[in-house]
């Protein structure tokens, strides 16, 4: 196969792989009924006047399935961290005992579980769109190459290869979603 054709196929693979990584990252932020420190990844605190990710000013742990603890490296940050978690719209009410900020994760209701599955489906569909966009971009580049002298049969073979890759990544998306759905719906 032509080097340039291979380059476009590899580029599409890379875009699809990054889409899967993004899907994993986004789904890990969904609360599935048990404590997961990744839930707090997007929380930022005011650290001496600059917004700083919570993980850079405190140790975040999950000592049991229903609790997340946030232990700041400076005790003066306790109130700031508690306020940042309250303002993050995650629906948690953190408890400050003077040493650590404790977040109790309530069990999910059936309705909330269904809402989380819908949210996961939305994230999954966004990933599918990005996979289709990567496929379309690769095929468009291949069609441009035909105009510049690439044989049509080579272009068709490359298109089929891109479609096979897209199908395999769509299957991965289905698997990732199925695992997350099971995790959310398991009581």
Image (cartoon, rainbow, N blue to C red):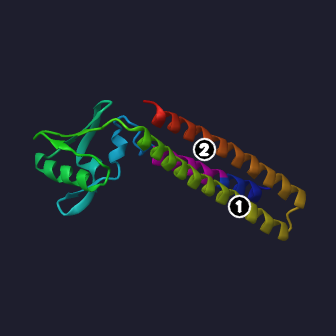
Tell me residue 145's x, y (percent).
80, 66
Magenta highlight range: 13-27
147 or 18, which lies in front?
18
Taking the spot 57% from the left edge, 37% from the top edge, the residue there is 178
7 or 90, which lies in front?
90
User: In the figure, is residue 178 to the left or right of 90?
Assistant: right
- At numbered mark 1, what does the secondary structure look like: helix, strand or loop? helix
The quarter of the displayed image where residue 144 is located: bottom right
- Label 1: which residue? 136
Which mark is nearer the camera, 2 or 1?
2
Taking the spot 70% from the left edge, 57% from the top edge, the residue there is 135
Taking the spot 62% from the left edge, 51% from the top edge, the residue there is 16
- Label 2: which residue? 173
In the image, residue 120 sits, relative to residue 110, either above or below, namely below
Taking the spot 60% from the left edge, 44% from the top edge, the residue there is 173
Tell me if residue 112 is in the magenta stretch. no
In the image, residue 109 sits, relative to residue 44, either above or below, namely above
Q: How far apart are marks 2 and 1 (CA)?
A: 18 Å
């Amino acid at each position: 196969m032509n080097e340039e054709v291979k380059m476009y196929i590899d580029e599409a693979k890379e875009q699809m792989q990054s889409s899967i990584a993004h899907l994993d990252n986004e789904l890990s932020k969904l609360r599935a009924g048990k404590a997961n420190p990744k839930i707090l990844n997007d929380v930022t605190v005011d650290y001496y006047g600059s917004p700083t990710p919570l993980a850079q000013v405190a140790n975040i742990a999950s000592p049991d399935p229903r609790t997340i603890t946030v232990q700041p490296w400076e005790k003066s940050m306790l109130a700031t961290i508690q306020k940042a978690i309250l303002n993050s719209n995650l629906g948690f009410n953190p408890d400050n005992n003077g040493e650590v900020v404790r977040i109790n994760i309530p069990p999910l209701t059936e309705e909330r579980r269904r809402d989380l599955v819908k949210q996961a489906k939305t994230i999954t569909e966004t990933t599918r769109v990005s996979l289709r966009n990567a496929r379309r971009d690769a095929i468009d580049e291949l069609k441009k190459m035909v105009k510049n002298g690439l044989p049509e049969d080579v272009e068709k073979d490359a298109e089929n290869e891109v479609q096979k890759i897209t199908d395999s990544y769509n299957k991965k998306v289905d698997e990732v979603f199925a695992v997350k759905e099971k995790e959310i719906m398991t009581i």
